[in-house]
Image (tube, rainbow, N blue to C red):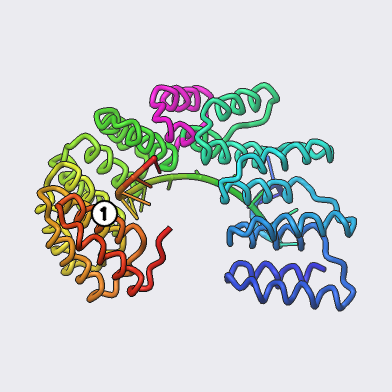
Amino acid sequence: AKAYNMIISACARASKPDLAVQVFHEMREAKVPPDQFTYTALIKMFARAKDLAKCFALYDEMKQNGVKPDEVTFNVLIDACARNQAADQAYEVLSQMRQAGVQMTLVTYNSIIHVNQVAGEWEEARRLLREMSERGIHRDTISFSSAINACAKDGEVEVALSMLQEMKASGVPPNNYTYNAVLSVCDKAAQWQTAEKIFLIMRNEGIPTDNFTYSSLISAYGGGGQWERAQAVLEQMKMDKVRPNIITYNSLVWALANSGRWEAALQLVSGLSDKAVKPNNSTFNTLIHACKKDAQWEKALELLQEMKDLNVPRDGITYSTLIAVCGEAGEEGRALSLYKAMQEDGVTSN
RNA sequence: AUACCUGCUAUACUAUG
């Protein structure tokens, strides 16, 4: 079975699910019984493809064939639920894991905390951190980073900061994921001053900063209308030798737009043509939304044309934003014709 | 070698909500 498993994993890694399934069938025809590794690898593959139904079908098949799901199988199933934002199903898997007498490991806890993160359940995440400690399960950087992320949805900065503090007090080293998570919480909580403070601490501690760091910081500034500080971050990045990517630029475009500086936002994007970074769907959607200010509906339609010219994909957000811009500008007729244009463009609304 | 040796976990951008 090991040889087949290796092939299946290789197919999964290469994102060739059909091939992996084919090998799986050949395995059965060759009368080689699949084992835990086989099923778990396949479940993981469908987890990544966000096909929860297939994950559970394999899980059922596995049990029917008398292959006992082990701790890794359950962890992968929990991860599959997290990726599909199916918190309830994740908890159901957890209870089946208990019923099967399989012990929860560090990764199980981390995966469940990730589920809490997706669901924004910071209280549950905090409880699990405590439970791990009580049960003598070593908590690692991922445990705390995920728990901090669980605070993002509700913007619970105080809780996130206390988790960071406890982490340090427990001797668990924060890394860039940890600090980026804290920055993300500050962003969601609209606390750019706290974000700035955290960023400085991060650098003082010698934690490497990356594009996630800067884009979160830029968004936090943008949320507070601090477009000048947001712009300054881009300069800081150059000094720090971190190359901005399209998301970083999009964050700045959004920060400028949200600060009422739509002209600067447009200028920033035109300036991208010299760089290796190409504007994408989000870039344009943000710019189109920025046209709401001052009823710039003509500019918005120009941007739509530019998207087509540059082969930037349009989506439902593009058109619903355009319709809103035209509608608010008193151009109801255009708003209506945009709906038709959307269908002609092959974009389905939802 | 308590590493590697078939399977598991965390972070950033856009409209509406």
Q: Residue at x 44, y 23 (%)?
A: A159
Q: Position of residue A125 (x, y in %)?
A: 56, 30
Q: Is residue A27 above or below residue A333?
A: below
Q: Residue at x 45, y 31 (%)?
A: A151
Secondary structure under the numbered disc 1 in the rendered image:
helix
Closer to the camera, A27 or A205?
A27
Closer to the camera, A144 or A271?
A271
Q: How many discs appear?
A: 1
Q: Given the image, what chain letter belongs to the residue carrying mark 1?
A: A
Asked if the magenta segment contains residue A47, the reply would be no
Q: Position of residue A296 (x, y in %)?
A: 12, 55
Q: Residue at x 22, y 49 (%)?
A: A252
Q: Look at the image and tell me in which quarter the N terminus of chain A lies.
A: bottom right
Q: Residue at x 41, y 42 (%)?
A: A176
Closer to the camera, A191 or A292?
A292
Asked if the magenta segment contains residue A152, the reply would be yes
Q: Residue furthest front?
A: A333
Residue at the spot of label 1: A250
Question: Which quadrant of the structure image shows residue A302?
Answer: bottom left
Judge from the rendering whether residue A155 lies leftward or rightward of residue A132; answer left or right. Answer: left
Q: Look at the image and tell me in which quarter the C terminus of chain A lies.
A: bottom left
Q: The disc labelled 1 sits on which kind of residue?
A: Asn
Closer to the camera, A220 or A346?
A346
Q: Position of residue A112 (x, y in %)?
A: 62, 38
